[in-house]
Image (spheres, grey):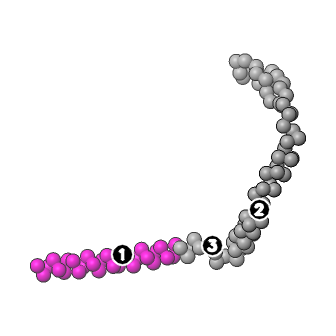
Amino acid sequence: MENMEQVFEQCQQFEEKRLRFFREVLLEVQKHLDLSNVASYKTIYRELEQSIKAADGFRRPCLTVAQIATDLQGWPNYVLAPPAFCTLMTTCQPLWV
């Protein structure tokens, strides 16, 4: 029975050592992945946050519609494919212009 207690204690010590190792490794990885301490990244994240907060969800679609709506009736024009292209295909189909 005494032998089993020793084995149990050894296992507990090994487990504690293993957990300490993983904790140290993960904390080190976290330090390298933590970009909040880099000054240039702080600026980028601050600008991104300001851009997101400044975005106007109503005005933007209205501007887009106003800019694009003038060309909504413009249908695509078709032209025949060049002869060199037609030799590669079995049929000569119109291409978008």
Q: Which mark is residue 55?
A: 2
Residue 84 visible, this orientation: no
By secondary structure, the bulk of the magenta-drawn segment is best described as helix
The vertical placement of 31 against 89, above or below, is below
Which type of secondary structure does the marked residue at label 1 adopt? helix
Calculate the distance from the C-alpha at mark 2 to the C-alpha at mark 1: 49 Å
Tell us which disc is closer to us: 3 or 2. Answer: 2
Q: Earlier in the sequence, mark 3 or mark 2?
A: 3
Q: Secondary structure at mark 2?
A: loop
- Name the residue beneath numbered marker 3: 35
* Most foreground residue, 68 or 47: 68
> Is disc 3 surrounded by few (<14), some (14 to 19) or many (20+) residues within 10 Å?
few
- Quadrant occupied by the N terminus: bottom left
Between label 3 and label 1, give the one nearer the viewer. Answer: 3
Q: Position of residue 88 (x, y in %)?
A: 72, 23
- Residue extending farthest right: 70
Which badge, 2 or 1, comes first in the chain's sequence? 1
Q: Which residues are magenta?
A: 1-29
C-alpha separation, residue under disc 3 versus residue under disc 1: 28 Å
> Does any portion of residue 96 appear in the rendered image?
yes
User: Where does label 1 land, which residue?
Assistant: 18
Secondary structure of residue under mark 3? helix
Name the residue at 88% across, 41% down.
Answer: 70
- Look at 51% across and 76% down and name the residue there: 28
In the displayed structure image, the side of residue 82 where residue 2 appears, left or right: left
Amino acid type, residue under disc 1 in the picture = Arg
Residue sticking out furthest to the front = 58
User: If the image is split into quadrants, where does the C terminus sit?
Assistant: top right
Q: In this rendering, would 24 be left or right of 90?
A: left
